[in-house]
Image (cartoon, grey):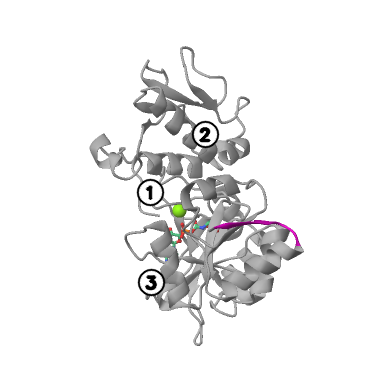
Amino acid sequence: MTERLEANDAGIARAAALLRAGGLVAFGTETVYGLGADATSDVAVARIFAAKERPRFNPLISHFPDAESAFAEAAPDELARRLAERFWPGPLTLVLPRRPGCTISDLAAAGLPSVAVRVPRGAVTTALLRAVGRPVAAPSANLSGKVSPSDAYHVLRGLSGRIDAVLDSGPCPVGVESTVLDLTGDSPVLLRPGGVTVEALAEICGPVSHPDDYADTLPAAPGRLASHYAPGLTVRLDATEVAPDEALLAFGPALPGGGLTWNLSPEGHLDEAASRLFAGLRFLDSEGARRGLTRIAAMPIPRTGLGLAIRDRLRRAASPRPG
Ligand code: TXA
Ligand code: MG
């Protein structure tokens, strides 16, 4: 039985107690819902991979209530401190060297000498992490290969019966996962575009190396898709017209001739589009399949600001990776 906990003192206390006892608790952050477990426990972390049916042991992000507790586990350089000062709490994950005595389990870190740490934004999230008093490992709270959850209902649709509880703090305001920045090398490397834009990072870091466009890779063949993302409509990026067998993911004024449509932002605001992305994909996928459609035509999204993260997630929706 999966408990749905209210985001009040009692709910937060219950969620923290379950996590401290090695349980699995999904919780809202500003980005997406995370599937949390005690990051210091290999046994608890292993339950995350089992609940998600995640085929590989990818390294997970550890979550903290503040920079001080994060930097007790991971060793920041000067740049990491400045980034934390500017963007925490907020949707930025830093990959840093482990400190000697780091308590994060080898399974959460996938045996790497580095760890990914993040201080999410949100009063309920912070209160929960403070109450747990240990690093909390949390990938997105969805079955592997499915769309990330941006509200508690999405979590329960995928994971009810597989996890101990979900702490319902309402919909996630940012809507795409955190930006992951690797600071272990000579210069910062963007591993995943996300809620903090590269333009904002550049104000602190200078230029950040990253592929020009995370969405340039071709979508996977439909056959490969079926096993990951059933019923699995494929996604076609940068669509300038819409075919009769396509659902439309619009951005700005919708293309003419679209039937089933979800508009990410009629006025073309990228922050609104990010916050409505995963709910839209879920809707078009299930309703489109019900209507016998075969594809989602996604209108062009700019390659700037949050557009980079949106394009990356659309490409992954066409070619889902585990997790
Ligand atoms: O917004 C988010 O980041 C959400 C919420 C729940 O906080 N979490 C999330 O976690 O998206 P997950 O596990 O789906 O993403 C972890 C990312 C992966 O791309 C992983 O490869 C990278 O972080 N990562 C974790 N540890 C790493 C490490 N030591 N070195 C390089 N990459 C690492
Ligand atoms: Mg994920």
Q: How many numbered callouts?
A: 3
Q: Who's the residue at 69% across and 64% down the image?
A: 12
Depth check: give the residue in front, 254 or 224. 224
Instruction: State the image quarter where residue 230 is shown.
Output: top left
Tags 1 and 3 touching, CB below 8 Å: no
The magenta segment is 2-8
Q: Is residue 247 toward the left or the right of residue 126 in the image?
A: left
Q: Who's the residue at 63% across and 26% down the image?
A: 267
- What amino acid is found at the position of numbered circle 1 in the picture? Gly
Which mark's residue is nearer the viewer, 3 or 2?
Answer: 2
> Where's residue 96, x and y in %?
49, 72
Q: Is residue 8 toward the left or the right of residue 79 in the image?
A: right
Q: For mark 1, what is the residue?
A: 145
Q: Who's the residue at 59% across and 80% down the image?
A: 72
**How packed is label 3: few (under 14 Cα within 10 Å), some, or many (20 or more)?**
some
Q: Which mark is residue 110?
A: 3
**How packed is label 1: few (under 14 Cα within 10 Å), some, or many (20 or more)?**
many
Residue 173 located within the stretch drawn in magenta: no
Mark 3, ligand 1, within 8 Å: the answer is: yes
Q: Which mark is residue 280?
A: 2
> Where's residue 39, x and y in %?
51, 73
Depth check: give the residue in front, 239 or 6. 6
Instruction: State the image quarter where residue 132 is shown.
Output: bottom right
